[in-house]
Amino acid sequence: MGRTIPVNRHSRLAVGIGASLCLAAITLAVYWQVGDYGFVNFDDDAHVYENQHVVTGLTAENLRWAFGIHGPSQWHPLAWISHQLDCELFGLNPGGHHAVSVGIHLVTAVLLYFALMQLTTATGKSLFVALLFAVHPLNVESVAWVAERRNVLCGLFWMLTLLAYGWYVKRPSAARYAVMTVLFAASLAAKPMAVTLPFVLLLLDWYPLKRMGIPVDSTSIDGARTVSVRTLILEKVPLLGLSVVSSVLTILCQQSVSTVASVDSVPVTVRLVNAAASYGIYLGRIFWPWNLAVFYPHPAFFSEDPLSRLAIPALAGTTAVLLITATAVALRRRQPLLLVGWLWFLGVLVPMIGLVQVGRQQLADRYTYLASIGVFISTAWLLPDAKSPAIWLRLAGRGVTAVIVLAAAAMAWHQTQFWESSTTLFHRAAAVTVGNSWAHNNLGLAYQQRRQYAVAMQHFQQALQIDPEYALAHYNVGRLWQETGNSSRAISSLERAIAVHPDFAAAHSQLATTLVSLGQLDSALPHFERAAELQPETAEAQLNLAIALGRSGRTQEARRQFRRAVELAPDNADAHFGLAIAAAEAGDEHIAETHLLRTVELRPRSVDAWLELGRLRLRQNDHKLAVEHFRMALSLDPGNTEARTALERKSGTEDD
């Protein structure tokens, strides 16, 4: 007996290492290509390369911001910190960011294998599920898209929570429960997609853990004792509490940027019908993952009769859900994991099924990242395994699983290629979907960044042909007209964007900037004020308003706005400089000096700041420091007449 245990342990270790290497090989074979890919102009800008709280890396201020209530999406501080760390390590080299996402996904797949092994002891089936998860084409969106770091990071902590839960139920203790709870909290902090995990744990309590004591004609792991259903529910209450907190924080974040669609734009009836259709569509794409797109437009935004368009998919989806549920319930004693996997799929998708409509999408491949595992589990335990009595069944089972995994890997490799650039990604989305105004809008942005203005305008116009009330497309047309020097047309398009979406802060800000460029400051000021009102926590909006107020002669109001901008962005040199000028005009030279010194600390090559410091020193009769400041300004700008004149006067005074 003493020799058998180590042999078994060594055998399990060898199998685990082999499975891990197999997962690593096939995952890297699919995703190695992303190392040469760039960022895309869908969320990568807001989440990474244009987000100053991210690109400046791990700082105390950025960490504080990561835990705040703000857009552009959910409350996911760990994902923000992950991006900040990437920028600390790789800067804005997208290859490093992509490599980290692939690495996290790979580790998650390995952890999924070990979690299923811990729960079921079924080596082959656990590996099959993990392999499908690693290379399924629906998961490409989560792995190849840098902004979806939150998805893979959530998955990582989800699997760690599963492992910790299996560890806890074998020998329950407060310490083990605490470890599991912390890991679950981390999963929520990566992305609130994990809110359904407590229900998954309760499902696993029924089988394979058999903690509920309900008879099942199958074996499970040893060591989990039977407890009452009431106790199991109470055990999950702290976890459910964390889910509620995460959900509330996410709703607050989304409301702060107005991403939640109103009942008027997407009626409740349409949402319910779309949810039924989405279950069927998701299930179909799990088994036939072809013609995938980064964005599937919701019929409510491009069809005059969305219910008619959704009727047949909803009927098919409802029928499939009812039939599979009835079958799984009927087979629950002989094939309990069929029911477990199916309920996993149905339940994990609930928060993302569209009952709360966020944005303009009908559904998204990334929403199945964790939900699809349930279908993989059901499929794996329906296939013949190594314990089948007939050799032909065993061989057939191995052959089918190999074909499925290799086919999925090939399709995933193909799907990954569309993520090479913004243009390849959005051309693909436009090609395989109907009414995709969003794809054409983003194509317009991609071509505008390349300065291919005519092509960009064509795609913006295509977006507006599909959806004439698409405020974002009107806004982008306005920005394009402004960039190409046609301010009058820019104003017309921006006013149209605001008419469609009165709370469109960026449109107000852009319209105000365009009006200022035409010398219409009085007309611009209300739009700067509205943008600042809509974005009270955005330093840029507050700063723009402060500058406009200052130019309008409203010095006291400008000073308050500059102070607010400094509070929001302590490292913004423009905000400090503006506050210094406003303070100087009010005669508060001490405040002016403080913020001018901070300005040159942040921006040491600012000629205007050094000149203003020189003027301040003259008013303070500190001629020695004034000379130093004017000399610095002159060294930065040798042709600056004010600095040269001031130094010549000082020199002449000294000669006299």
Image: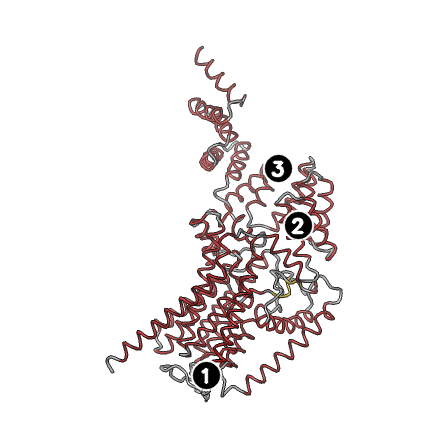
- Residue highlighted by disc 3: 554
SS class, disc 1: helix
The mark closer to the camera, 3 or 1, is 1
- Residue highlighted by disc 1: 229
Q: Give the residue drawn at x 52%, y 66%.
A: 409
Establish if 136 lies above or below 84. below
Q: CA distance from mark 3 to mark 2?
A: 39 Å
The mark closer to the camera, 2 or 1, is 2
- Does the CB distance between marks 3 and 1 fall below 8 Å? no
Amino acid at pointer 2: Gly
Determine the residue located farthest toward the left in the rendered image: 2
Q: Which of the 4 image quarters holds residue 479? A: top right
The residue closer to the viewer here, 644 or 375, is 375
10 Å crowding of disc 3: few (<14), some (14-19), many (20+): some
Amino acid at pointer 1: Val
Q: Name the spot of residue 366 as percent of width and height, x first.
A: 55, 64
Q: Which colouring convention does the figure follow? A: secondary structure
Q: Earlier in the sequence, mark 2 or mark 1?
A: 1
SS class, disc 2: helix
10 Å crowding of disc 1: few (<14), some (14-19), many (20+): some
Establish if 113 lies above or below 36. below
- Residue highlighted by disc 2: 444
Q: CA distance from mark 3 to mark 1?
A: 67 Å
Q: Name the spot of residue 266 as percent of width and height, x first.
A: 68, 65
Q: Image quadrant for the C terminus?
A: top left
Amino acid at pointer 3: Arg
Q: Earlier in the sequence, mark 3 or mark 2?
A: 2
Q: Name the spot of residue 272 as percent of width and height, x first.
A: 66, 72
- Does the CB distance between marks 2 and 1 fall below 8 Å? no
Determine the residue located farthest toward the top in the rendered image: 656
